Image (cartoon, rainbow, N blue to C red):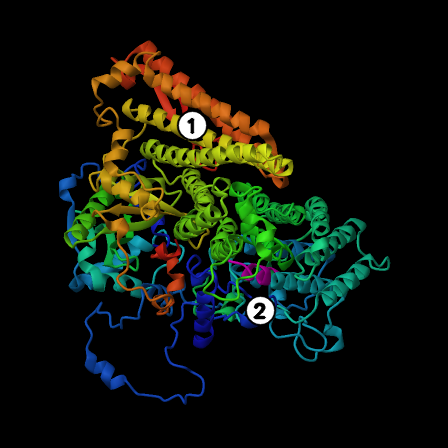
Amino acid sequence: MADHGDANPENETSEAVAPKALQDSDLQYIQYEASKEEQYLPAIRQLISKDLSEPYSIYVYRYFLYQWGDLCYMALSPSNDLIGIIVCKLEPHRSGTYRGYIAMLATASPYRGRGIATQLVRQAIDAMTARDADEIVLETEVSNTASLKLYERLGFIRSKRLHRYYLNGNAAFRLILYLKEGTALKRPEHVEHGADMGAGGMQDMRRVDEAEMYA
Amino acid sequence: MADASSSRRAVSAQGHQASLVSDNAGPSHAQESAPAIDAPAHANLPLRRSRHAVGGVQAKMHDITEKFTRASLEVGQLVKDEYFTLFESIGAIEIMDPKMDSGFLQPGETLEDDYDTLTPLLPEELIGIMDQLLCYEMAWHTGYPLSQTLFTSVHIVKLVWTEATVLGPQFYRGEIPEHRRPGPLLEVLRAYCLAVIKGCDFVIAKITGRDYFEEEDFCTHIYNRVLLVSVPIDVFLRELDAAIEVIEDPESEINDGVRKAISARLALRKDYLRALDLDLPLNQTSYCWPPILQGIATLKNTHQLGQSVPGAFSSKMQRRLASTVPPRPIVELDFKDALQKLQHIAADCEEATRFIALPQDPLEYQSFLWHFASRSPPPLAYARAYLSTLLFHPDNLNTSVSLPLSDVKTLVFPASPVLDSMNWTFSPPRSPLLPKPPRLQFAMLMDEFVERTGQPFLDLWVALGQNRCRLRRMLTHVITAWDLLQTDAALIDTDISSAAEELGIGEQVMEFSLSTWVYHKKLWMIEKVVLLGFEQDIYLPDEFAGMYLFLSLIATRRKELLKRVEAHYLVQANLFLTSRKLREAQEIDDAGLYLDSLLAEAEGTASLALALARFYILLLYLGLLPLPKRPFGTEALRYELRMKPFLSLSPPEAPAFEDFRTHTQPYGSPSSPSTAFFEAVGKADSELWAEVDGHVKAAKAAFAEYKKMGVVAAKAEGVEKAWGKEVQSALASCVALGVAVAGVKDMVVKKGMDGGKEGWGMKVEVPEAGTGKRYAEGWVVVKTHKE
């Protein structure tokens, strides 16, 4: 998703400023629920938009959280502060696959380098696998080595480079993890030539998702 | 607006690129004059289009307060229909959030910019503004919207506010008192600005006239403004001439250096505008770019004479352009960088003009397109559209001999009776029930094939005109189209063969000639896709071996195919010699040159790819390449994803995973290789090492041969330098690989396997793409370092 990589989920080199004594077992990972919006959404927005030049409106968050709140996981510190977040969606893709998409991932900077983002991604993958996803995709900036490493260690591979993908002019890699055999051979059930692109300004979605239609 | 944009979509969906270029590409056949009138300025704004026609419908107001109150929504509950997309949610802005709401005012902030465009300027300030305008113009060329670049200039925006009046666009509106009238320097700035605006109009028309990707390659938004589309170029040139006169007037009290600097800027702008002119005759294009390249130096040397006028540019202008887009930062480009971009555009366009002088040969065109696309730095959208316009110029495409046919002839039908011009002189028998003469059948079958192949053929050329990332992805689609073409070609081949048998000249026609030609082109494209993947760092180091192995497999297929053609040439040449048809024999001989060149290149590619594959297999077993743990997914699934673009092809069939694994992992799992590996790798004279060395040697020999045969044989005369460089870098990659292999071998043999990786003290570095650390971007050769 746009500038999602900027959130720099996990920087191996950055020194954790957080209390060193903090044990990983002190951290809590919980699933988001719609009833928690008032409690968590302000913190989620703050965490995600910290490194973004252009913040997402509240509708973007609600778009994901209202429809796929169960694919959103949060990491909380012992004092119950939000220190990590992953936001996803899962729906049939025009290519014919049931496609999961990691839209946002961020860890609070003092807590980076402890595998929190990795843990969040693992939980999201497990959740999407349980819900029968064929594949999981995401984009990240080509220069975001930390993010690339994180996903590639887990099993994602790069499928394409997207020229000037972000508003700042930077390129992205599309990363994909196949979960099921035969995913590459899936085809849309009914192809309405051109017509399926008609609704709702799909042509601009490449900033966010679905760049698949271009290649 | 809704109608305008949906009709545009419909138009481009019918366009010839519909399957390749999404409708995001905008109008694929835009009319030259189109952009200013036609571009639906709102179509790409994050506005939700009404699904009902707006025109003519009387608006009705409904009070929904009560319904809304009754609805009692939960916090966070989203009420939306199925047409509300993620894109639309992203387009939404929050009023009163300064980062999103462009109308939000900080305490004391004014809505409009208060710079007065009639403020008199110092000559130095004139230079400052001109140079700043060039910076923004070039930033726009690199892909940023006008709203973040040129349209931040208060002067420019004033001039595009309305279509020209009698006096032409002015920095003021309506009547103004005499003492407020702009002085000579403001008039000079006005002339300069007008030329900048007209230049933008030309650029947009050129780019939208070809296939490109909006916002990715370029932003054509003009925010409902009119870029003086209907004013002819002469008007702008006259304004610039008048401005030059004003500046060079000895009466004016301008310091000489400053005067010259301003003059040079006006002169360059004139040259540039002329070069951008859409109606410039073909035979003048090659003269229009060199003056720009020459003019750049003067600008560079006199930039410091200028004085910036920060007030003349403002991000507040965005508020007038589009109120529904969050405020975005002005894109700052240094003047030095701006000149570099201008130089880049002019040099690429100058190179593109050489296309006109190429011999009329589709294979020369193909070489030219490939090498143009491979230029470093990569050509910007304008230069690509510029070349593409020349390529698709009617004078160029309307040749007497069809371009695909001439391509086919070169490879599979030299001196062939199938293409004998006599064949086209036969008339069909009066009665459709009578059989057609076989020669007439040849002609009809070839016509059918040429017709069928036209689109896939042009698709390849269109793909070669895209940015590098798109080129790789678009080629995979072109390959699929050529796969279908091959099926059709095979049917026509059968008919050609039976017609040839009927004539008793079966041996003069190679079996499956047309399919061979299609297959050859298809394999060539697959090779390019894999090489582009390496160039774009798509593959991780532990995937190198597998992907190079696949590349080697494809190139070997192509080589074998070419061998078949070669065998046919031999038969044909002998037939001609024995029947004393010397001219035909000579034709075969000539065709043989190109064939040999292709063979050498295919051999080089296959061998180098195989050498790299073997070497990377070895490095993986030695633990010298990073191997991620990958708790999710499986090797088979990753292989499926890698082969996705090729799974539907036949031929070539992507190898089955088991096959692939056997070949990439001959010694078992990379993390625990069998003892056979350790035995082999520890001996300098083992077959393992001999094989790698052998392939490196074979590759070097083949590329050297290819180089020796030269640019004429390779049909790359038009790009001699670039071709030479490409061959040289392939050779250099062979040498570098030889060195890397020797380094690893010595280390392992000397220090043995017992100490393992730690004992060797060796590090392997994978050179990153695009950093100048590779001899050839597609041939990734690691460097070894002692630790």
**First reached walking from the N terminus: tag 1 or tag 2:** 2
**Residue drawn 58% across and 69% down?**
B34
Mark drawn on residue A178: none
Q: Residue B384: x, y in percent?
A: 56, 51
Mark drawn on residue B34: 2
> The C terminus of chain B appears in which quarter of the rendering?
top left
Q: Secondary structure at mark 1?
A: helix
Q: Is residue A54 above or below residue B472?
A: below
Q: Amino acid at mark 2?
A: Ala
Which residue range is magenta in the image? B203-212
Q: Residue B649: x, y in percent?
A: 35, 47
Q: Residue B436: x, y in percent?
A: 49, 58
* Residue B674 among magenta residues: no
Query: Toward the viewer: B707 or B352?
Result: B707
Q: How far apart are labels 1 and 2 at the CA level?
A: 51 Å
**Image-based side of A135 in relation to A148, left or right:** left
Q: Quadrant of residue A72?
A: bottom left
Q: Residue B123: x, y in percent?
A: 73, 57
Residue that numbered label 1 is attached to: B607
- Our reading of the magenta stretch's main secondary structure is helix
